Image (spheres, coloured by chain):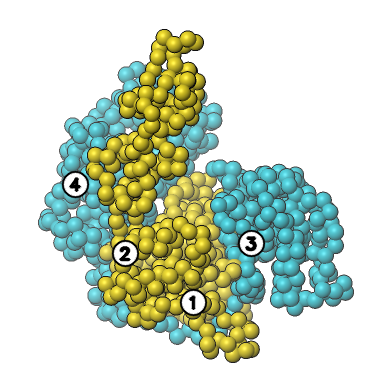
Chain colours: A cyan, B yellow
Amino acid sequence: MPTVSVKRELLFQALGRRYTDEEVDELCFEFGLELDEITSEKDIISKEQGDGKAESASDIILYKIDVPANRYDLLCLEGLVRGLQVFKERIKAPRYKRIMPANSDVQRLIITEETAQVRPHAVAAVLRNITFSKDRYDSFIDLQEKLHQNICRKRALVAIGTHDLDTISGPFTYTARPPSEIRFKPLNQSKEYTASEIMDLYRTDSQLKHYLHIIENKPLYPVIYDSNGVVLSMPPIINGDHTKISLNTRNVFVECTATDITKAKIVLDILVTMFSEYCEKQFTVEAAEVTYHNGKTCIYPELAYRREKVKPDLMNKKIGISETPSSLAKLLTRMCLKSHVTGNGNSIEIEIPPTRADIIHACDIIEDAAIAYGYNNIQMTIPKTYTIANQFPLNKLTELLRQDLAAAGFTEALTFALCSQEDIADKLGVDISSTKAVHIANPKTAEFQVARTSLLPGLLKTIAANRKMPLPLKLFEISDIVVKDSTKDVGARNQRNLCAIYYNKNPGFEVIHGLLDRVMQLLAVPPSKESGYLIKAADDSAFFPGRCAEILAKGQSIGKLGVLHPDVITKFELTMPCSALEINIEPFL
Amino acid sequence: MSPAMATDGPALAERLLQQLERAGGGGLGSLEAAAALGLEHQQLVGAVKSLQALGEVIEAEQRSSKRWELTPEGKEIVQEGSHEARVFDSIPAEGLPQSELMKLPSGKVGFSKAMSNKWVRLDKNADGGPRIFRAVESVRDAVREKLQLVQQGEAESLEEKDRNELKKRKLLMEVIIKTYWIRKGSAFSTTVTKQETDLTPEMLASGSWRDLKFKAYNFEALGIMPESGHLHPLLKVRTQFRQIFLEMGFTEMPANNFIESSFWNFDALFQPQQHPARDQHDTFFLQDPAEATDFPMDYLKRVKKIHSQGGYGSQGYKYDWKLEEARKNILRTHTTAVSARMLYRLAQQEKFTPAKYFSIDRVFRNETLDATHLAEFHQIEGVVADYGLTLGDLMGTLREFFTKLGISQLRFKPAYNPYTEPSMEVFSYHQGLQKWVEVGNSGIFRPEMLLPMGLPEGVSVIAWGLSLERPTMIKYGINNIRELVGHKVNLQMVYDGPLCRLDV
């Protein structure tokens, strides 16, 4: 969930009144936001770097507000205020308009064929006669960063560039060139570099290093030039220094390059609708023309208003309320979804503004009606759905066995399903290739290399972590292991195992053997060659030679028991003899 | 102390009782009693304690008092004489070379003291080196005499400067000792009957128990814990949650498949392929088996279409949906993947029947670990599928569910989940923290998830989820999740854990 931080004073100024912190918290909650923290820059710096560094920092109060991940229109102060003011019926939702300048004046962006292999899409728009202040400017930069981190997927899907239009002249060309042929002065640098040098320059940059991989291994890098060959940006890495905007910038050229055109359009719409508030003609955006290499021409921003019709009856039924059509329309209007009743009152027409890309289905509209109605005002009801409950047989058996294993004096452990290769292979004296273990592709540490193929390592590690406890230690676990199985759709399956371990000054094979007999007694399986269970001598690298037996039941091998091999005991950092039992309980269902 | 006097338990106790009888109603102090009976104080204390155990025979009030005692060196002097006396005694008439004298155990200290007492003299010019001679005929060992007085309990009769001098010489020490003031009790008697420790079969057979006295039990001590096994606290809580769902008529889903395809975990839930949750940083992908091979292809095509083009009244996400992405195997990130499989199965029925499902099982996140987050945890999930379910129904079901957990004050906050709309986070008022805390997440599954499965249009599916670990940590007051889950568990905590009753 993205977090937006806004200055408390600015928020109150924009909302036109003051609130207590509790009132803000309440208002946010109702609207689906969360006032996460009340802090200041000073607090933040002193928390992260110590009090000394924080002395000169600002102590202006900041609200950190958690915003739902699909509400890009609430990622800046401007949008938050607009949303809340409309919700509180203090203002009407603004209507965003695209303005076409005289044909000869429209800004043009031409996309060349070379971009196809690296970043094929671009959209653009102009914010004309905008007035920045320090706070507005900061908010403008911050919104771009928030969009980059969220919908733009860390610039992989979309990258935004904003430029002082008065420093460049169109038409602009979006192309892709070999890194050696791109040369310009990057933002806030003092000299020119080639694209390859730029990549090296930012390899250690705490922010930009995260974006390099997006184009690094491509033969051609994306780049935007003006008609005089001035570099606007090398997306998605960095803008040129030449076009950088300042507090005095009056006209902003916005371009978004993308691998996902739908997201690029949304990002452009959000950025320009939010900041068109500060244009001379409020809430208007000057169009730009984008031409693809095949001649296809598009006008941006789209700023499309879409109309949907939803039946009031359906809304009431889905929410569980009974509001009149007109009051439903009013609720929706409070959510920036301008609505009115049509027909004979059996339909509501809703206009979805370009800021609400999250509305893709009637259910999204219904949710907004419910939010405006107030979730906590909805009458709670109990569904009449009549059903008979069933337990999952494997879990039922597990629950019953757990109780009786505890009654037999063994204590239940709960160990991780993921572990290192070493745990299930080297430490048990087997080669990893001989296990049927599933392997994880992207573990952050060795603890998560594989899914366990045995419960034994987890129990041994539990004992190792509890060596201070009085002996004997008697532990068990009934849980799932995972093995590869090509007959399954995903190529692997779980198996429910029971493992128990006895750790004492003597190996206690008879204790573990007795536990097996007890488990079989509980499962009503008699000791018998024909129809019951039996154990017979076996070899297993995890067990001491001559002290290991295989357990046969239901006509199959279900596991092993024995005295653990001294090497295994030592590798798990234990010092006492130990015997163990592990069986698959699924045959007993 | 005379060895002839009985010092064993009962006899000693009786002698104390007789002494007490002689002392009359005012009682007597244990130190005086010990001196009077010629006992070590500690022996007398033993007698007091054994009499106390008999009940009301005596009353003993504990006091503390200071007393002078001999140090080990002081005791040695009482036995052997002072060092200076010993030096004096060891010098024969013809004298002793100084070097020889210094080799004696008491030589060094004794020589300087004997010199300052003028008991001996030193002839530096004697033949064969310096030689020591007696300077007086006989001596009186005053140090020994004083120490003997202390040993007889008459330290008070010494002058203070003498005591200080002996203390400085580390022959005396002042100790604080616990003493008793002993009075007759309500059941006072000068004889002690032997007490039995416990009933025996012989006593029962002979009936002798009727005439015997039994030692009193100490009810302040703890008993001996029974030897037993113990269930794990987290799984005790799991049992209770299972019970709650079963009480509410929910059927348990088979959640025993940790490995899931991205298709069932994400795509089927209408979670777009570029969603951050599908990132390497959040999800464990598998290297082997890397891909799932088998899908219900008709359904998969409908899923592809709803993502890339929309349909069923939805705009869709309008992106290039790729089968390769859906094939990727992962460790499931939520049990909702299981719910998706169950709902798909439900949709394949000839005629729809309502269903209520639950599961409690492990899920996996490739996340940064801290005191409250592990890479694997247990998710609790409830699902109801029926015609015409409302948001009010979801809230009502949650109210019933949480009431069974002992949580009555609930509040609902609008939220966003990719696969539910409307979505609501559930908050409850925490009395301890004095604030609202999130206790679960819920919503109505999106039509884009349900309709491609083939569920009838009027069917709504409400669902909610929460973690098993969080309520358990709150219930048992555990701050670090590693003490609860995994091999670093504190077994003592498991041994000592109470029953799990969530609504108490």
Q: Earlier in the sequence, mark 1 or mark 2?
A: 2
* Residues indicated by labels 1 and 4 sit on the same polypeptide chain: no
For disc 2, the marked residue is B29
Q: Chain of mark 2?
A: B
Which is more toward the observer, A97 or A13? Answer: A13
Q: Residue at x 22, y 31 (%)?
A: A246
Task: Estimate the spatial distance between the alpha carbons at disc 1 and disc 2, rounded to whole Å.
Answer: 25 Å
Disc number placed over residue A474 in the picture, else none: 3
Q: Which mark is residue A61?
A: 4
Q: Quadrant of residue A304?
A: bottom left
The front one of A455 and A432 is A455
Mark 4, chain letter? Answer: A
- A275 relative to B368 in the view: left or right: left
Q: Are marks 4 and 2 in contact (CB under 8 Å)?
A: no
Q: Disc 3 versus disc 2: distance between alpha carbons?
A: 54 Å
The nearer-to-camera label among 4 and 2 is: 2
Chain on which label 3 sits: A
Q: How far apart are the two marked residues, 1 and 4, measured between alpha carbons?
A: 72 Å
Q: CA distance from mark 4 to mark 2?
A: 73 Å
Q: Residues within 10 Å of mark 1 (few under 14, many from 20)?
A: some
Which callout, 3 or 2, points to the residue nearer the camera?
2
Is A205 drawn above or below residue B155 in the view shown?
Answer: above
SS assignment at label 2: strand
Disc 2 residue type?
Answer: Gly
Residue type at tag 4: Ile
User: Which mark identifies residue B215?
Assistant: 1
- The answer to whether the residues at label 1 and label 4 have Cβ atoms under 8 Å apart is no
Label disc, if present, on residue A355 of the rendered structure: none
- Give the SS element for disc 3: strand
Q: Amino acid at mark 3?
A: Lys
